[in-house]
Amino acid sequence: MIIATPKQLEQLAAEYKKTADKHKKMVIVCCGTGCLANGAQKIVDAFEECLSRRKVKDFTVEAVKKTGCHGFCEQGPLVVIEPQGTFYTKVKPKDIESIIEKSIENDEVIEKFLFTNPKDGRKIEKYPDVPFFSHQHRIALRNLGKIAPFDIKEYIAVDGYEALAKVLTTMTPDQVIDEITKSELRGRGGGGFSAGKKWRTCRNVPSDVHYVICNGDEGDPGAFMDRSIMEGDPHSVLEGMMICAFAVGAKQGYIYVRDEYPLAVIHLQKAIADCEKHGLLGDKILGTDFSFSIRIARGAGAFVCGESSALMRSVAGEVGEPRAKYIHSVVKGLYDQPTVLNNVETFVNVPVIINHGADWFREIGVPKNSGTKVFSLVGKVRNTGLIEVAMGTTMREIIYDIGGGIIDGRPFKGVQTGGPSGGCLPESKLDLPVDFDSLTEAGSMMGSGGMIVMDDKTCMVDVARYFLQFLVSESCGKCVPCREGLYQLHKLTIKICEGNGTEDDIEKMEKLSQQIVVGSLCGLGKSGPNPLLSTIKYYRDEYLAHIRDKKCPAGVCRNLITYRVIPELCTGCLACITACAYHAITGQKKEPHVINQELCEKCGACVAVCKHDAIEVS
Amino acid sequence: MITVTINGKLVRAKEGEMLLAVLRREKIDIPALCHHEAVEPYGACRLCMVEITKKEWDGWKNMVTSCLYPVADGLIIQTHTTDLIELRKTILDLYLARCPNTPEIQDLAAQYGVTQTSFEEVAEPNDCILCGLCTRICDRMGFGAISAINRGHGREIAPPLKNAPPDCVGCLACALNCPTNYIKYSDIGHTREIWGRKFELLRDVRTGQSTITREFAEYLSKHRNIPQDYFELNDESHRKETALSLGKIAIWSREESQ
Amino acid sequence: MIMVLQDIQREYRYLPCEALLQTAQALDVKLSKVFSVATFYNAFSLNPKGEKVVRICVGTACHIRGAALIKEQIEHHLGIKAGQTTEDMKFSIEVVACVGACAMAPVVIVNDKYHGGVSVSSATRLVKN
């Protein structure tokens, strides 16, 4: 059914809102990847099965909604009962029967599923009161956890495509660009470049052909913001792209989705197909002269393809080798045509800015860093998951108030931001406001929003080594500083982790890093040394401990640690002997076990399975 | 025509031409291992990097690969600052780690005072510097028989599936332009062998010297309108023929004018 | 070209040589270019994969939560290293850079099924059957 005019869209929105409201109660089951991995589909199945057996007054299986990621992955599977907002965590299929009986047929709250605030031990009933959510300001994630992603009706019911209608009927392309520029929206993929400026430059290139590409590659390990948005609210991505296409004069758009996100591809494809059916993509959209189509281009497993020129080569079916950008891709991009490339999160902010205005957007955040940012808070933090906060929120608030602090109450050691292009920030930087400029000043960068929290059991030299290994395997191999330089840096960090480092090595790495930064062709190489340089800057003592004392204070680097069974605590349960892949532990049942140091590979499997804390690492 | 400043000297150039061409014209010695006039610039070796600035940039400088940078009016260029020398030294040092026994790299590195790599040498070094010239020249010739495969440090130049390349015609453009003579070929009797593939070598009907492979000759006949029998003589014989003809014409025209 | 190769990879679980030749012909591109693309991207494999492909995520979040140990355990139990396939073609091990399930670190994917919060003992169970 084609939506031929904006008026029709308005009418449909009103109609769909009424349908959505007709349910007295609704059950929302989080079906983001994390919860799905934890069995969310089984929860949905259990609801369907239960409801087919029992007739519940005013409640049918249609009121059970599968939504995208709520963000609180640590506590999944999640079930929310609306409109009360009752928030149930760690739900299992066998619990569904009692949830239906108590919370749906009646209005009882089942205490044992409620989230317990670790700060004061109190149970929290409603979803907006949970600190994880109450500190957030959800703009990009506005619909995640609220609408079913594969139903265009739900998107329209929450004012979806209203911004597009407004743009097409009441604004000129230049006015759109003015508004986006005024909002000071900066690229959320990590570059932080003014979106408005980019659009303006692209529009001004005289060409019959312009392209709009959405970067859904999300190569930073530890980041899953874009994934959740593409899976949980695909229409918001499309709407943002459409508005951009109108502004720059593009008729064709692409969404480049990482190969490792097959579900995102499926959800986006459905959204595109639905838009085409409703005439929101194709020719003469909403009865205007604007025509636009979107195709999905899949990545094939290359981090370097997150870089704009490599990405465009990949869309064109070639090897993802970046090129020198003395002529920017916004001028000569895909197939040498002017192309706007923006991140998923950037596009998702566009409809909101159009609807609420640039001034409204600028009031959120801090000067020159307006709006919010989505972060994936992962690592050794209690509440791992996806969060969105206003720019300028401090690291401390994010990690402690939202994240709930470090697991097991261990000491905080550092937080890595910006992925392999970013750096590690120590405790002294916890009160840093999180925004583009402050992070770059401190030696890290915002990046796409990955925040990896580390405790005292993380070795920072090992972290540097890990990032260099990643970059070496992802380097395209075209230019010498990156291909050879990062390889040599990696070798040097291995040397230090193995206890063979010398004091000169640190200086050598710093000098080589400098040249890699200057000489590399693209961002991968240019920012590659960042993790190494930031860990040397803030954790120099740890490097020196590895070099001078041949010790790894965190107990990670295998050559520098020994595993020993504490005979007094060992119960002789044989668990470690079974777990040891190298047959290095011997011992009889009920007798203290012994680790043979010659065979021990220091892998840590024994510690992982020992329930009696009887193995000491020194 | 525009004006740029190179190492303090005013130089005229054509707007949009690549900086390296201007530098070369001014006889400024900048190494550029992955560069060849016959193909598009690549920007892989990074040795040709220079420092640029403009008056209106208020002191902000940029380092760019001159092979890929189009000149503009008022550009101010420095080619041998301490930073640039340091960068070239490091790049050559890294090259030596990959190709420690390659004379061309050793010589170039020695020019910058690097006699030995300060890094870890690769396990089994060869002479390939991964400049990609062979693949780009092969593409330009129209054959695209070889390409760069794998990614990152494991990158190599190889024929598809590492077997005899089906698109190769044995023209030797790759081998003859390789800066380090890494690509080996052999001409023995009527057989040329390169990249693991054997070709039939046509020989000059008069002198017996090798001319060209049958495959290349067929390609040229088909695509460049050259008659097949042209290849019965090699270049030297053709030149002799032409010289004799020109000589005959000279004698005839002298006779005519007398 | 990438999408064509992806479809082939999905169908056969690897890229047979004949497929590369056919792709070059069908798309009218040089075989060397197809081979470059096939060897550049992680998604493609030139060797046949096992019935069950065990993908171990070694992204940062998973690394911090002990992915290296999980990888070692799985490698030990199957007797092969990452990138290899067992003799009986039942299992292949691959490492993946990040699958975007970071809050569930460490993550192991067996064919298309995600397993989060994998521990030493559960890793063994994953590859026992």
Image (spheres, grey):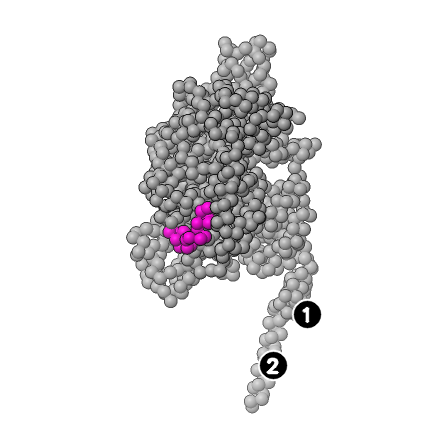
Chain label for disc 2: B
Amino acid of disc 1 = Asp
**Residue appearing at x 51%, y 54% in the figure:** A287
Q: Main secondary structure of the magenta part?
A: helix
- Residue A605, can we see it? no
Q: Is residue B179 left or right of residue C110?
A: left
Amino acid of disc 2 = Lys
Q: Nearer the viewer, residue B111 or A158?
A: A158
**Residue appearing at x 62%, y 67% in the figure:** B224
For residue B248, which quarter of the picture? Answer: bottom right
Mark 1–mark 2 Cα distance, whole angstroms, equals 23 Å
**Residue appearing at x 47%, y 28% in the figure:** A85
Q: Position of residue C73 (x, y in %)?
A: 58, 26
Disc number placed over residue B229 in the picture, else none: 1
Q: Nearer the viewer, residue C86 or A316?
A: A316
Q: Position of residue C76 (x, y in %)?
A: 61, 26
Chain label for disc 1: B
Judging by the rendered image, the residue that carries numbered circle 2 is B248
Q: Is-magenta flag for residue B213?
A: no
Q: Indicate the secondary structure of the residue bearing disc 2.
A: helix
Labels 1 and 2 positioned on one and the same chain: yes
Q: Nearer the viewer, residue A61 or C125?
A: A61
Above or below, A566 against A170 in this view is: above
Q: Nearer the viewer, residue B191 or A293?
A: A293
Magenta-tinted stretch: A162-178
Q: Residues within 10 Å of mark 2 (few under 14, many from 20)?
A: few
